[in-house]
Amino acid sequence: MNLQGTLDYYDIKSIWHFTDLSNIKSITNNGILSLRNLINHKIAVACYGANELSHQLDISKGLDQFVHLSFVKEHPMQYVKTKKMEIPNPVWLEIDAHVLFKKKSIFSDTVANKTDAKIYTDINDLARYIDLDVLWTRTDWKDPEIQKRRRLAKYGEIMIKDAIEVQDIIGVYHG
């Protein structure tokens, strides 16, 4: 199934990016920029969603040229960063899923800079390698196997090359 077919089948209209409220002014002015663009344009970031090790891993794998997004508004990394108070005022930015057609988009089956992460360069393969059923369809949430599948699927990432324009941000939600 191609990307449009996948979006239609699962009725996916949005993808998600988490950040801290302190970054909203910069995002309003510049869009959501990749780490590489932030560095190259010398844009100060009040509160990163990733730590220095994560940034170094992204750079070493060439993933610093991408904006990292979540399939759902529940990425485990955001939960950990908020619990540790590393993101004191978390916000989720809702991104129009059609941004996937505007720029080069890739995806990963887990946190992209992990050693065992698989990076897929053909966005049309999304439904083939990501357990979208457990993320986007009704299922038995009490089933331990379903819970495990969902927990793993939430680690997946979509990455958009360079930047996401302000007009592609369709919502801002606290929490």
Image (cartoon, rainbow, N blue to C red):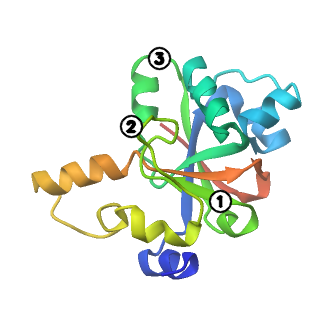
Depth check: 157 or 118 in front?
A: 118
Q: Position of residue 48 (x, y in %)?
A: 63, 25
Q: Horizontally, is 133 left or right of 44 in the view?
A: left
Q: Give the residue furthest to the right.
A: 41
Quarter of the image holding residue 25?
top right
Label 3 residue SS: loop
- Relative to 92, does residue 55 appear above or below in the rendering? above
Depth check: 12 or 145 in front?
A: 145
The dot on residue 76 is 2
The amino acid pointed to by label 1 is: Ser
The residue to which callout 1 is attached is 105
Disc 1 crowd, CA 10 A, few/some/many (<14, 14-19, 20+): many
The amino acid pointed to by label 3 is: Met
The amino acid pointed to by label 2 is: Pro
Q: Position of residue 153 (x, y in %)?
A: 35, 52
Disc 2 crowd, CA 10 A, few/some/many (<14, 14-19, 20+): some
Disc 3 crowd, CA 10 A, few/some/many (<14, 14-19, 20+): few
- Relative to 27, does residue 95 appear above or below in the rendering? below
Compute the Cα span from label 3 to label 1: 31 Å
Label 2 residue SS: helix
- Mark toward the start of the polypeptide (2 vs 3): 2
The residue to which callout 3 is attached is 85
Compute the Cα span from label 2 to label 3: 14 Å
Indicate which label's residue lies in the foreground, 2 or 3: 2
